[in-house]
Image (cartoon, rainbow, N blue to C red):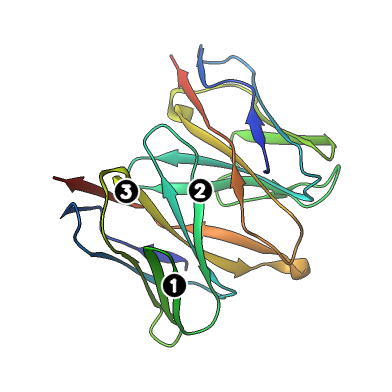
């Protein structure tokens, strides 16, 4: 079974802090994604990556950046956390460009105070 | 623009049948996914339709009409454990031959005895 692991289930950070959310997948998937999930809005794509050191902006990239130095790891960075970034963050991976069935991590509930 | 609509909430009785509808308007279409998400857990894959018609998998079936921009998820012989959110997602082409998933806001289904 594919396993997508997010480093934290719950995080509380202060406004202005730099925040790192880590995601690791163990199935040699090429594609990795970061979403945030908010009530009434569903999952919205922040950034994605189709290869090591490659990144593409999703629909809501403002205030975020990402890093993919190794194939199995995709990090989401909040350069200066703000209260409107309080949300559930979900990482996902999929095999390659032909197969976009996404496998999700358990999610990180981030609260910015 | 990109728009995926599904009802916010539904309720149903244990043992009954429920149909969750999804309509979409996207700039491109390469398939439609349904995911199940229990509260506090990761979304998990249920079904994938790329051609018109019905796909059956045990108690769950999914239907697609590309000309109408419409899909539904049919759940039969409902069980209490089916209480969850159901997410409709369209696979939409982007540059470079890649695809991304665009999610609806999800339908929260409550099954009662």
Same chain for marks 1 and 2? Answer: yes
Query: According to the image, label 1 marks what residue?
Result: B56
The one of A98 and A41 positioned closer to us in this rendering? A98
* Chain bearing mark 3: B
| Badge 2 element | strand
The label shown at residue A72 is none
Give the mark nearer the N terminus: 2 vs 3. 2
The mark total stands at: 3
Q: Mark 2 or mark 3, which is nearer to you? A: 3
At x 48%, y 29%, the residue is A85
The one of B17 and B33 positioned closer to us in this rendering? B17
CA–CA distance in space, label 2 to label 3: 13 Å
Query: According to the image, label 2 marks what residue?
Result: B44
CA–CA distance in space, label 3 to label 1: 17 Å
Spot occupied by residue B10 in the image (x, y as percentages of width and height): 20, 54
Give the mark nearer the N terminus: 3 vs 1. 1
At x 76%, y 70%, the residue is B97
Compared across the picture, whether B111 is left or right of A102 comes to left
CA–CA distance in space, label 1 to label 2: 17 Å
| Badge 3 element | helix
At x 57%, y 59%, the residue is B101
Spot occupied by residue B91 in the image (x, y as percentages of width and height): 57, 66
Q: Residues within 10 Å of mark 2 (few under 14, many from 20)?
A: some
Give the mark nearer the N terminus: 1 vs 2. 2
Spot occupied by residue B30 in the image (x, y as percentages of width and height): 60, 74
Q: Residues within 10 Å of mark 3 (few under 14, many from 20)?
A: some
* Chain bearing mark 2: B
Query: According to the image, label 3 marks what residue?
Result: B82
Kindly indicate the quadrant of the structure image that contains residue B69. Answer: bottom left
Compared across the picture, whether A33 is left or right of A44 comes to right
């Amino acid at each position: 079974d594919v396993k997508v692991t997010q480093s934290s289930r719950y995080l509380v950070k202060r406004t202005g802090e730099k925040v790192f959310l880590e995601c690791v997948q163990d199935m040699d998937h090429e594609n990795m994604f970061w979403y945030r999930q908010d009530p009434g809005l569903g999952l919205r794509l922040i950034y994605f990556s189709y290869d090591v050191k490659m990144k593409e902006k999703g629909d809501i990239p403002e205030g975020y950046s990402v890093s993919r130095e190794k194939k199995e790891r995709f990090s989401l960075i909040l350069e200066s956390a703000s209260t409107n970034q309080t949300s559930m963050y979900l990482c996902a991976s999929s095999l390659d460009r032909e197969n976009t069935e996404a496998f999700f991590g358990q999610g990180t509930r981030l609260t910015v105070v | 623009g990109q728009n995926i609509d599904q009802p916010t909430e539904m309720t149903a009785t244990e043992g009954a049948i429920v149909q969750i509808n999804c309509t979409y308007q996207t700039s491109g279409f390469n398939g439609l996914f349904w995911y199940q998400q229990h509260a506090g857990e990761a979304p998990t894959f249920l079904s994938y339709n790329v051609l018109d018609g019905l796909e059956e998998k045990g108690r769950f079936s999914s239907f697609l009409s590309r000309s109408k921009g419409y899909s539904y998820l049919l759940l039969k012989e409902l069980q209490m454990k089916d209480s969850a959110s159901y997410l409709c997602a369209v696979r939409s082409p982007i540059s470079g031959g890649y695809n991304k998933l665009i999610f609806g806001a999800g339908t929260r289904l409550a099954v009662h005895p």
